[in-house]
Amino acid sequence: MHVLLTAGPTYEPLDPVRFLGNRSTGKMGYALAEAFAAANADVTLVSGPTALPAPTSTHISLVRVETAQQMYEAAAAVAPRADVWVFAAAVADYRPAEVAPEKIKKQGDTLTLTLVKNVDIAATLGQAKRPEQFSVGFALETTNELTHAQDKLHRKNFDLVVLNSLRDAGAGFGHDTNKVSVLDAAGQVLTFDLQAKTELAHRLVQLILSRFAVSYA
């Protein structure tokens, strides 16, 4: 089995010094890569910038990227031959319309930036997903969590969506623990209580592989 897995943030440069980014550490995605490898799957891990050490498993091939466009290109190159897609990265929705060639100097009291939309990696690849392929997305929400997650599931052609809420203490960015709910297209919701991301990763992989086996059969 071949798994495509995206993890970490993306950085969208403003100039040679600054960038637009987010607080993702990549911990959940890297834990999932290790869990898939432990289940004897071959994993292509497309990772945005993180401070995490590279995985040591021989089952994991690490592809490092920085921007959303680079992540899309790396994922698109692997997606056609992967059996399972897991989109755990926190991809920037927008990027600066122009990247300054030199450091932007402080001038005046305000700075106006024009942003343009990045490619939606999961939605774009989801348009070409074959029936025998299985796609899992992650959603981090702060309001109307279930409604937004269900919308993502249908709009991006996911088979499962893993929902995080920043309102749950100890969950989300920067923590070694996480609490998630998993939604499927039938409207079922499974809840995983707060636990170490490494432990949660193994439980999620078991669920994904069992659902993949059923859908493939």
Image (tube, helix red, strand yellow):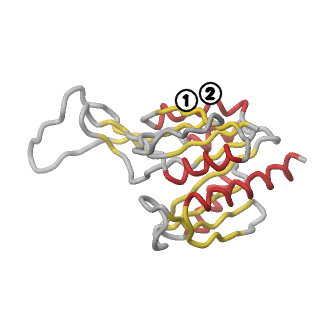
Q: Point out the image quarter for the N terminus.
A: top right
How far apart, in angstroms, are the residues tagged by discs 2 and 1?
A: 6 Å
Mark 2 = which residue?
Answer: 77
Q: Which mark is residue 63?
A: none
Is there CB contact under 8 Å for labels 2 and 1? yes
Residue 92 position by quadrant: top left
Q: Nearest the camera: 162 or 117? A: 162
Q: Residue sitting at 67 percent across and 64 percent down?
A: 182
Q: Position of residue 9 (x, y in %)?
A: 44, 46
Residue 11 position by quadrant: top left
> Callout 2, which amino acid?
Ala
Residue 183 position by quadrant: bottom right
Q: Nearest the camera: 101 or 211? A: 211
- In the picture provided, is 182 more to the left or to the right than 92? right
- In the picture provided, is 196 more to the left or to the right than 92? right
Q: Residue sitting at 35 percent across and 42 percent down?
A: 115
Q: Residues within 10 Å of mark 2 (few under 14, many from 20)?
A: few
Mark 1 = which residue?
Answer: 73
Q: Residue sitting at 73 percent across and 42 percent down?
A: 40
Q: Residue sitting at 61 percent across and 42 percent down?
A: 5
Q: Is residue 149 above or below residue 27?
A: below
Q: Position of residue 212 (x, y in %)?
A: 80, 50
Q: Is residue 76 above or below residue 144?
A: above
Q: Residues within 10 Å of mark 1 (few under 14, many from 20)?
A: few
* SS label for mark 2: helix
Q: Is residue 125 above or below residue 204?
A: above
Q: Residue furthest left?
A: 108
> Callout 1, which amino acid?
Glu
